[in-house]
Amino acid sequence: MLFVIPLTPLGKGGKEGESSPRNSQTIMEKERELLLGQYLTLYEFCTCTKTYQKYAEKISPFPKNPESRIAIADLNTQIIDPIIDRFGRDNFHLTYGFCSSDLKRYLARKDPLTGQKNGRVTPSLDQHMAMEKNRNGKYYCDRLGAACDFFIEDVGSDTIIDWILEQKLPFDSLYFYGEKRPLHISYGPQHKRAIWAFTPTGQPTRQGVRHWLEKI
Ligand SMILES: [Zn+2]
């Protein structure tokens, strides 16, 4: 399915108000090239989840609020670009980027074969919906900003956190799920510098992250 949204190419010298073709195929092709920072495209950021890939024809993956694009671009330039500069583009794997309101619905659904939910969503807290608003004009997540989950091939998530703290990257929240699991990181106006781990039942805990908190 093609989803038509107005385009202002980021990082490619596009000018606001420039006339753009209204042909949706052309626009989808441009989405694939629209850079958010130095490396990732908006297309990759919005379509990387397994759930999107499974239901792609039913999901509009891109942000509707232009503020979301700005927040996602800021996350890329402030956090993701320096991480890729250090660890390499080929080693960086995004597992979850932007969550559109469509994607949220499908993540919350159960897979009919396994009976398991497609994904875990806490839209009011996790910043994956960036600056999207609900039908009443309220932000889904008052924390604002934007978030993503990623891993680096052959590098433990604990080692990546060590490096992020050494570099003093201006993150808002970091979630550590284990050395061999993707990290969640966000960038936003609250600049909370929060780091959380999780118990086996998914409750946030400071256990295992105190040594990092002391370095902030
Ligand atoms: Zn996340």
Image (cartoon, helix red, strand yellow):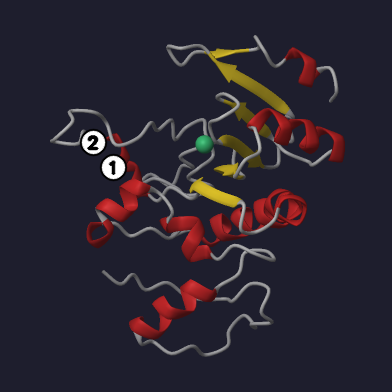
- Say which mark, if any, is on residue 21: none
Residue 30: give x, y in percent of width and height. Answer: 48, 79
Report the label total.
2
Q: Secondary structure at mark 1?
A: helix
Q: Quadrant of residue 150?
A: top right
Q: Which residue occupies the foreground of this view, 55 or 99?
A: 55
21 versus 86 height, above or below:
below
Residue highlighted by disc 1: 105
Say whether residue 134 is left or right of residue 70: left
**Residue at image point 49% right, 88% down:** 20
Disc 1 crowd, CA 10 A, few/some/many (<14, 14-19, 20+): few
Q: Is mark 1 within 8 Å of ligand 1?
A: no
Residue highlighted by disc 2: 109
Report the quarter where the C terminus lies: top right
Residue 129: give x, y in percent of width and height. Answer: 48, 45
Q: Which residue occupies the foreground of this view, 175 or 8?
A: 175
39 versus 199 height, above or below:
below
Q: Are marks 1 and 2 in contact (CB under 8 Å)?
A: yes
**Residue at image point 34% right, 83% down:** 25
